Image: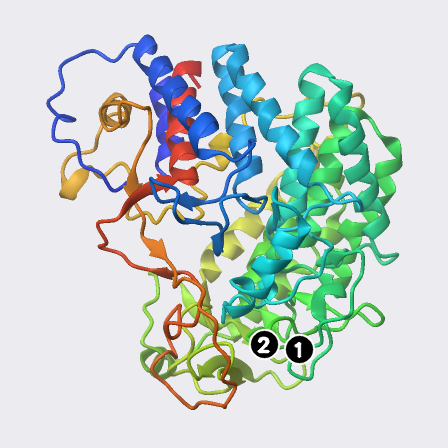
Amino acid sequence: MTKVMKINRIIVSIALFAFVCPALSGASKKLTNSDVLKSMKAATEYMMNTVSYNGGFVWNYLPDFSRQWGEMEAKRTMVWTQSSTPEVGHVLLDAYHATGDEYYYEMAKKVANALIWGQLDCGGWNYCFDFAGEESLKDWYATVGANGWRLEEFQHYYGNATFDDSASTDCGKFLLRMYVEKYDPAYLVPLEKFINFVLESQYPCGGWPQRYPLMYDHPFQGKADYSSFVTLNDDVIPQCIDFLVQCFQCLGKQGLREPIYRAMYLCITLQQGKPYSGWADQYTVIDLKPAHARSYEPVGINCSTTTRMINQMYKYYGLTGDTRFLSGIPAAIDYLESQALPQSEIEKSGRRIGAGSVMIPRFVDPVTGEPHYVHREGSNVQNGRYFFNTDISNTIGHYSSIGSANIKNLRDQYEKVISTPVEEYTKDSPLLNKGLVPLDKYYTASRAGRGFGGGFGGNFGGGFGGGAPMSVEDIIKGYISSQTPQGCWLTPLNNTSNPYAPYEDNTPSHETKYVSTNVGDEHDTSPYSNFGSSVQGISTSDYINKMAVMLHYIAGE
């Protein structure tokens, strides 16, 4: 595959950055590697020297740093582990591999040191940490966090670590890469600390809780604290397995084989029986029955989780060659097909569906088979509430009550897998191969399109304004020409939030104005979209995505 073909494969998934450079299509100056390297270095120096706080990052910043955001608004001293800082570390290591420039390795060390500072005594990480200290973080939880209506995971300060959104495993994977890069013992201690954390937190059944050490101190709206439940949601179990597999393949830790297999085989057990043969997001520990989570996540078989788990079962089959991982897939596909909504319900929902796909309730009661559609009333944390019923109309907007699946594609994929010789399907398995297996040289290629707050529009490849497709060279020229003299890339900030303002009035409200919005009234600190805003800012994901294209261009990948 040529350089351009490989880079196009990367950038086709990257969202269209919201700048238009009129010189792009007509630029005649030939793009040189020197131009690209200079731009990459300038952007990285700005991000590391000006944007980062002691090597850590959040998601978005105003240019004067008067406000900044992770999943919620953050203090300047805060660092987000969730979808931010570890990803910067990965792109820096990738740039080091592409260029051989020791500068990028030194900056990756700076990011790693920030994460080591934020590593909890237990060995894992929270979504975020604060260089100003734990009391400052507690203050944030009691103000901004406590008033994010739809972000219930931030309404309570636990003081422990989380596997949710790969917050801990992403940090662990980056430290693993840092250690095996040069086998610097400085990174072995925190890495071993996290490996022990993952092993200690694993339940005997093979699964992991959302948070650890186990806490039960936040029963919410009359329901048990869900953070100890065995969790599939946001790929908690799959990401823990993935981390342990990476440790096994490049460190040769034979003791990890049993926990890996125990976790993989649990995924077979967690699939429900007919006629609702899918997977739930979380399960009670004692009897492994589907369980609730946040107040808008009722007990139910989740169609999106089921689709993801079908793909995970293919992965586990590829790691082991055990056909038991394939045995439940036909029933899972049958389940998804059986839940296809009639046209009347689709029209009532007001949603559109892709060609060849069926629309499915996101949550289906595992006992009755009835759909759970989620609604809300009120205007903020104090006076609002979430509830669910079987009415598909007027569901909440920030968390879809409806999913979709292309049944034909799912069946075709299954037929392709079972028709492939097992030796071929498992040939790259680090669990079956003898000896150590190096980690991937580049991580960012597969992650470049996973935007996390930059607020992007359409896809690359179609050109601006429906014009002809742009070449990789023209795209990179656009990056370079859009850089400020300081090396900064500015992009429209398409998300914002209401600043925290003290408020106490828990009188129940039946307000319906905020049913389908991301944010409630002015007292709701949940971020919300403001597409079309002219506010320019700094996006960590924008930096990562642009760097991904440029470094793979340099590497000729």
Quarter in which the C terminus is drawn: top left
Q: Is residue 223 left or right of residue 396?
A: right
Residue wearing tag 2:
295
Q: Give the CA separation, mark 1 to mark 2.
A: 8 Å
Residue wearing tag 1:
220
Q: Residue at x 43, y 84 (%)?
A: 378
Quarter in which the N terminus is drawn: top left
The disc placed on residue 381 is none
Packing grade of label 2 (10 A; few <14, some 14-19, many >=20) is some
Q: Are marks 1 and 2 in contact (CB under 8 Å)?
A: yes
- Amino acid, disc 2: Ser
Q: Secondary structure at mark 1?
A: loop
Q: State which mark lies toward you, 1 or 2.
A: 1
> Which is more N-terminal, label 2 or label 1?
1
Q: Residue at x 62, y 61 (%)?
A: 330
Q: Position of residue 227 (x, y in %)?
A: 71, 65
